[in-house]
Image: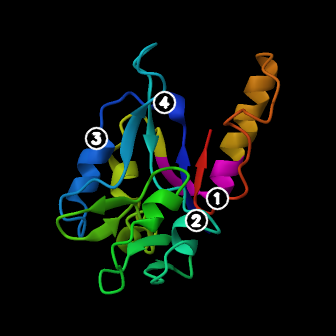
Amino acid sequence: MKKVMYLEFERCIGCRSCQAACRECGGHDSKERNYVEYVNFFENRQTYPMLCMQCKDPACARVCPANAIQITDDGVVLSAMEEKCIGCRNCTFGCPFGIPKFDFEENKMYKCDMCYDRTKHDIAPMCASVCPSDAIRFIDHDEMMELRRRRTQMNLIEGKKPSENDKWQYVPEFFGVYSD
C-alpha cells in the first residue's frame, strides 16, 4: 500500500516544529527544507505548512540544464545532485511554489525530498512525525481518500459548495502531497 503526505492547512498552529525536525533530519546539513507561511499576515496569524508538492512533471527538474534533479522510481523529486548542479538557479525560478532554495556559500540547491531515506521504508518524514496538530500526515493512499470523502461530505452538509478554487478538491497533478 502506497503512503502519501497529506496536508490540512487549517490545522496548522504555527509552532514550526516541522521546520525544527527538518533541520535535524540526516543529510540536511541543519537546513530546513520546508516552511511555515502566513495565509495573510496583516489580517490574522493563520499559518500553513509548505513543502515540496512532489509534482508528477516537476518544473524544477524540467528547467535544470544539468539534469541534476532526479526523480526516484517512487516518484519522489530529490534535491539537486551536488556533483551535477551547476548553480544556475533555474530550479528556484521554475518552481511555482518557491520550494527549491539556493545556498550561495556552498553553491548548491536544496529542497524537501520527503525525507526519502525514511519514506522509502514507509517511515514518516521528520515533519510529519512531529506535527502536534496533524496538519502534516504520512498516511496510506486509501486513508487519504477516505478523509477527503468525509471532508467533502462535511463541507456539503455545512452548505459549502465545491468550486474550482477550493483547496479541498483533489489535485491530480501532484504525486505525493495532497492538501485540503
Give neighbour class at mark 4: few <14, some 14-19, many 20+ (Cα, 10 Å). some
Q: Three-letter amino acid code at disc 2?
A: Ala
In the image as oriented, which residue stretches furthest toward the front? 88
Q: Of the two numbered discs 3 and 2 on the same chain, state the one appearing first in sequence.
A: 3
Residue on which disc 3 sits: 17
Q: Of the two numbered discs 3 and 4 on the same chain, state the one appearing first in sequence.
A: 4
Q: Three-letter amino acid code at disc 3?
A: Ser
Q: Looking at the image, do the residues carrying marks 2 and 4 touch, with CB atoms under 8 Å apart?
A: no
Q: Is residue 149 visible?
A: yes
Q: Which mark is residue 11?
A: 4
Q: Of the two numbered discs 2 and 4 on the same chain, state the one appearing first in sequence.
A: 4
Give neighbour class at mark 3: few <14, some 14-19, many 20+ (Cα, 10 Å). some
C-alpha gap between disc 3 and disc 4 = 14 Å
- Tell us which disc is closer to us: 1 or 2: 2
Q: Residue at x 81, y 30 (%)?
A: 162
**What range of the chain is rendered magenta?**
137-145
Q: Is residue 77 left or right of residue 34?
A: right
C-alpha gap between disc 1 and disc 3 = 24 Å
- Tell us which disc is closer to us: 4 or 1: 1
What coloring was used for the rendering? rainbow
Q: Which mark is residue 174?
A: 1
Q: Residue at x 43, y 81 (%)?
A: 68
Q: Residue at x 52, y 80 (%)?
A: 72
Mark 3 secondary-structure assignment: helix
Q: Of the two numbered discs 1 and 2 on the same chain, state the one appearing first in sequence.
A: 2
Residue on which disc 2 sits: 59
Q: Which mark is residue 14?
A: none
Q: Looking at the image, do the residues carrying marks 4 and 1 touch, with CB atoms under 8 Å apart?
A: no
C-alpha gap between disc 1 and disc 2 = 12 Å
Q: Three-letter amino acid code at disc 1?
A: Phe
Q: Three-letter amino acid code at disc 4?
A: Arg
Give neighbour class at mark 1: few <14, some 14-19, many 20+ (Cα, 10 Å). some
